[in-house]
Amino acid sequence: MKKRLASFLCALLLVVSAIPAASALEGEAARAADTLSTLGLIDATYDLDATATRSQAAVLLVKLAGAEQAAAADNWIAGFRDVPASIAQEVNYAARQGWITGATVVEFRPDAALTANAWSAFLLRMLGYSDKDGDFTVSDAAGFAQRIGLFPIAYTGTLTQGDLYEMAADALTFSYRDGSATVIGRLVSQGAVSRSAANALGLLTSALTARQAADRCMAAVFRLDTYESQEYVEEGLVTGEASGFFISVDGLAVTNYHSIEDAVYATATLSTGDVYEVDRVIYYDPDIDIAVIRISRTALEGHDTTAFAALDIAPSGTGDLRVGDTVYAIGNPLGLGLAVSSGVVSATAREVERYALPCVMSTADISEGSSGGALLNVYGQVVAVTSGAYVYGNSMYLAVPIDPVLTADLTGEGLTLEEVLDAEAVG
């Protein structure tokens, strides 16, 4: 029987992006607390259900920065009149670095309840982001942190100690803004944390489990809604659902060409629910079924942003893939929301009639709705773009190689979706 190929939007199995609000899943807080305790960042005694305080946040922040000794040697005084001597070093040091601010000029209010936005702002500043320079606003700090992938779930309102520890544990594997190191990497290099302890916890291991891939990479993937006419746009009638993923923090993203080929307008919806317009098509090739688009940072729904989470492309593209390698697929199956699946590479260069380049075939489950999603190696790097499947096959899912994006010129102004549509119609 002749094999029939369906070009559908590749999907992801089981782990859906129905994002739980704080507090998170049962047991997560305890695991996070145990991680921080093992690293020596918090005491071994804690009450996960108790309300987190601003003083606890200041002390933990300095420890996450590996700055305990620097804080002890710094005699600068912030001028807060309500800070007890037991935490004065940490509060004064963090204030001097610009990481924390007081409730007023003279009051830090150390016993006040800690909010998600306050703790997110503290962490973001420590990582090199600045609300003064407009990177984020304090009122949306938790949302911004989720958009850039610092936290895999949404946190709002007052935090428990369990929430505080979960957020701190998530930050351990996040990179400083300048790309110099991850938080845990810097702690280890400074000698503030034992390398053996970090290794034992798997924090220095580059290979990711499916759970880790979802936590660290899902924020960079989005639902792509397309509209085939201006009338449909005005009516709010979506005519196509697909996926895409960011490859730069300023909004460059990848999808399949067939996901946008009939569209005059499209939007990207993040895991946070924020919605942004597809601004331009920077590069596309119908024959290899890839398009690079630019997403506006001005929100149609939700919050404007200065940055997005972004995925790294494997340096050699599909070149290092081998049959049997584990891969993860992230996309928007059936338009139900972001999800992840895992599988193994079945073939690294499967010739398929409709594609100009050989495809990666894998057993990572996909479904209609996720064309343009990311196929990742175990290091969380993009190796291919999920694109289709053999209808009559079992676990025969196809992804087009990401390699052309590595050499494409992505510096041009690009075209609007309508201009691409017109250009292809003429061609």
Image (cartoon, helix red, strand yellow):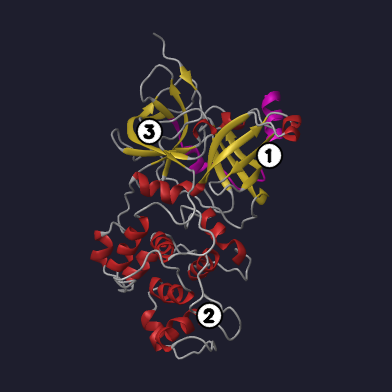
Front disc: 2 or 1: 2
> Are there few (<14), some (14-19), or many (20+) residues within 10 Å of tag 1?
some
Circle 2 Cα neighbour tier, 10 Å, few/some/many (<14 / 14–19 / ≥20): some
Magenta stretch in the rendered image: 399-427
Compute the Cα span from label 1 to label 3: 33 Å
Q: Position of residue 85 (x, y in %)?
A: 42, 89
> Which disc, if any, is residue 415?
1
Amino acid of disc 3 = Ala
Residue 424 % position (x, y) = 66, 27
Q: Secondary structure at mark 3?
A: loop
Q: Is residue 145 left or right of residue 323?
A: right
Does residue 14 lie above or below 103 as drawn?
above
Is disc 2 in contact with disc 1, using a CB cutoff of under 8 Å?
no
Sequence-first tag of 2 and 1: 2
Q: Are marks 1 and 3 in contact (CB under 8 Å)?
A: no
Q: Secondary structure at mark 1?
A: loop
Which residue was labeled with disc 3? 364
Q: Amino acid at mark 2?
A: Arg
